[in-house]
Image: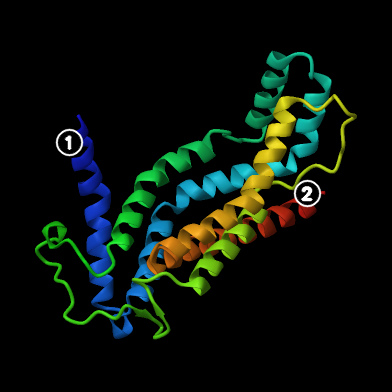
Amino acid sequence: MFSFISYIYNTAFLEPLLNGLVFLVGHVPLHDMGLAIIILTLVVRLIIFPFNHKSVIAQRKIKHLAPEIEDIKSKHKNDPREKAKKTMELYKKHGINPMSGFLTLLIQIPIILALYKVFLGGMDFDTSKLYSFIAVPEQISTMFLGLIDVTKSSYVMAFLAAFSQFFQMRLAIPPLSNTKKPAGQESFKDNLAKSMSIQMRYVMPFFIFFIALKLSSAIAIYWTTMNVFAIVHEIVVKRKADKLLKENA
């Protein structure tokens, strides 16, 4: 069973991404591996864009429905079953699939793992996994834009990865509610949600920074590119959503 899963993983994810990186390194200006990593990351993000887009739209709708959701929670605070029922009815009314984010994550996990393994290898391409029509370029520049060695860690790239992660989380995660409940009335769920929000906003970027310092800059370039793509996507969706709300007001 494990060998079958490994075969599917290598055939469907690892090998195509590795061959794509080798191909791009051979065709980008100056055979810059950093540029090849950026392009490959963007190509992958475009391929899975439809899934991401559905998730972002769903999250944006949920943000706009926050007052109604809070109202349902308040009215049915002592009846979890009715609260869940009314919330799902609200989601259905506005065409929201609360599982879209989870499904998107499931789709991305094998891709992220494969990309991570590909970039972690640096210039040590596994030729046994290359297609017959893909050849390793004779010249490969590991100096991204002539400044940063992608095979080594970099404080600059680690900072960019962490900063872009912070900004992306700030856009994606709903702001914490300013409404304070009386002492003793905050549920475990409320405290957990608040704690998770704070950790995702502030702890996660620090975690990314220190991890990026332990790994090659190739990983940081990939992570930064992925975050920048997500940030632009979030901003565009937000502007369109705000425009529609104004037109319907």
Rendered location of residue 106, percent (x, y):
42, 39
Density class for disc 2 (Cα within 10 Å; few <14, some 14-19, many ≥20) is few
Dot 2: what SS? Answer: helix
Query: Is residue 68 toward the left or the right of residue 151 in the image?
Result: right
The residue that label 1 is drawn on is 3
At 69% from the left and 39% from the top, the residue drawn is 195
Rendered location of residue 117, percent (x, y):
30, 55
Residue 131's quadrant in the figure?
bottom left
The residue that label 2 is drawn on is 248
At 46% from the left and 46% from the top, the residue drawn is 51
Q: Nearer the viewer, residue 10 or 104?
A: 10
Whether residue 7 appears in this view of the structure is: yes
| Tag 2 near tag 1, CB within 8 Å | no
Q: Nearer the viewer, residue 124 or 76?
A: 124
Rendered location of residue 70, percent (x, y):
79, 31
Residue 44 has which mark? none
Question: Which quadrant of the figure contains the N terminus?
Answer: top left
Rendered location of residue 72, percent (x, y):
78, 25
Amino acid residing under circle 1 = Ser
Density class for disc 1 (Cα within 10 Å; few <14, some 14-19, many ≥20) is few
Q: Nearer the viewer, residue 160 or 56?
A: 160
Query: Is residue 34 toward the left or the right of residue 99 in the image?
Result: left
Q: Earlier in the sequence, mark 2 or mark 1?
A: 1
